[in-house]
Image (tube, rainbow, N blue to C red):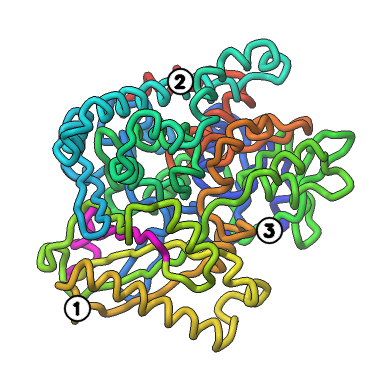
Amino acid sequence: MKNLYTSELTKSTYDSIIIGSGVGGLTTAVCLAKAGKKVLVLEKHYAVGGFTHTFKRKKFEWDVGAHYIGQVNNEGSLIRKAFDYVTNGKLQWDDVGEIYDQAIIEGEVYNFRKGLQNQIDQIIEYFPDDEKSIRLYYDLVLKVSGHASLFFSEKTMPRWLSKLLGRYLKKSFLKYSRQTTYEVLSALTKNEKLISVLCAQCGNYGLTPKQSSFGIHALVVTHYIEGAAYPVGGAANIHKSMESVIMENGGLIAIKADVKNVIIENNKAIGVLMQNGDKLFAKKIISDAGAHNTFNKLILPELQKAENTIALNKVKPSVSHVCIYVGLNATDEELKLPKYNIWLYENYKLDESREQHLKTKDSISPVFYISFPSAKDSEWQQKHPGTASIQVLGSYPFNWMKEWEHMKWQKRGDDYESVKEELKEVFLKKLYETLPQIKGHVEICELSTPLSTKHFSNYDKGEIYGLEHTPQRFELNQLRPQTNYKNLYLTGQDIIAVGVCSAMFSGVVTSISILNRNLLWRISRYKNI
């Protein structure tokens, strides 16, 4: 389906060239190809799919980013309809179950249950004296999430129309996205313990309550409020099913296709220059490389615009992390492993712990996230009989890896490998403390660092969520499909928000801007044949 890049591709011209094959780039490619456009997707690495990529070691397999998806277990939801549209209904889903997340804070367990009323009742059971505040909180979360549709729809508008209507469309969401999560929650309750529990899933957007925008908090909580699911056959089926649709509609995907810069003449994007000197031309150039990479790297310095670079540099890259990938020689059923994810916190002081961690080099992450991809996937035992897989993620600042930053992947030396081994032991210890029954069953354990993320995702600081989801992020006018270079567009999670679904909708939004068609109407009425 996908081919190594060759110079033969220069012999054609294209309607659209898409830089990067994350979910945003692939979604854009699907939408444009379905509209009859000649599309070429260029991927720097040997693997397509961005954070939906999976990798294998021996008889094991792990996802690298798509751990669970909300709203797809409801066939009538817009997110499910969008997935069906971009995959032609080829992607199937396994429900995670009645509990989709579990937080363990100072040893105390809190379950997040499928269904709004179930979740409200569960949190009230944990904090019966705060019932009024809890109900107000969930009402507000749904309200703010509802305002987001107008906020993001403004991004599809031409700039002249946005100047007329944008302020009105964005104001309701911005009222809350301009506040931190802590500012909003502390106005509802003075119970600091309750605030920490309500924010226990904050690892999904990478910032603690006093740093994060309440806008992203509301979006993430609402996204999972009716439960979660996992792709049947693993996360890679997300990008595989999209690739097939692109190809079926005449699109092309090239791997090992390293773009050096966008070719811009008279403030108009006309093509791309490859690292080998090839030039490819298209009517539209779409970057799925992230806003920082696009404006600071893919555009030549003499053509960069201060209004872009200054604005973007005010928002930091998001969190970087370390992850261990664990393969077990027994099944999830035998080991009694759950489908739900586990969030482990050392204490209820989420912000203070994070700040201390960032100040103290080589300190242990204040939060650990444990995911069970094999337990979630109904096809796992068919492909990997008698085994199970686990991932454990934790925070690890990119700066702590700086001395090895410019060394090649897998050739960073003994000191680097020694640090990795030490980290692996820390993470395994935390895993054994949480799930002692897996001791003696670990057959393989591999660790990735922020440098691994940088190598495979091309994010400069090993960030996993693009730009930080601070209140300032939602103020940036640069985070929209249309750039201030004619025929140069952005797609990907930076223009919407964190996560696979946001990246997918970024592709829809970008396609709407290019095609000037109401794709959401078409998606909402899409039916599998």
Count of residue discs? 3
Q: Quadrant of the C terminus?
A: top left
**Numbered circle sitting on residue 258:** 3
Which region is colored magenta? 365-386
Q: Earlier in the sequence, mark 3 or mark 1?
A: 3
Does residue 237 appear to the left or right of 309 in the view shown?
left
Identity of the amino acid at label 1?
A: Lys
| Residue under numbered circle 1 | 439
C-alpha distance separating marks 1 and 2:
47 Å
Q: Earlier in the sequence, mark 3 or mark 2?
A: 2
Q: Position of residue 317 (x, y in %)?
A: 60, 51
Q: Is residue 117 visible?
A: yes
Work out which residue is located at the far front of the displayed protein and give it. 190
Q: Position of residue 416 (x, y in %)?
A: 54, 82
Residue 380 magenta-highlighted: yes
Residue 488 magenta-highlighted: no
**Quick one: label 2, few (<14), some, or many (20+) residues within 10 Å?**
some
Q: Is residue 529 visible?
A: no
Q: Quadrant of residue 345?
A: bottom left
Q: Position of residue 276 (x, y in %)?
A: 77, 62
Query: Measuring 49% from the left and 26% from the top, which residue is drawn there?
Result: 176
**Numbered circle sitting on residue 147:** 2
C-alpha distance separating marks 3 and 1:
43 Å
**In the rendered image, the vertical position of residue 181 relative to residue 167, given as above or below:** below
**In the rendered image, the vertical position of residue 32 relative to residue 113, given as above or below:** above
**Quick one: label 3, few (<14), some, or many (20+) residues within 10 Å?**
some
Nearest to the observer: residue 163 or residue 468: 468
Tell which tag, 3 or 1, sits nearer the viewer: 1
Q: Position of residue 438 (x, y in %)?
A: 18, 73
Identity of the amino acid at label 3?
A: Asp
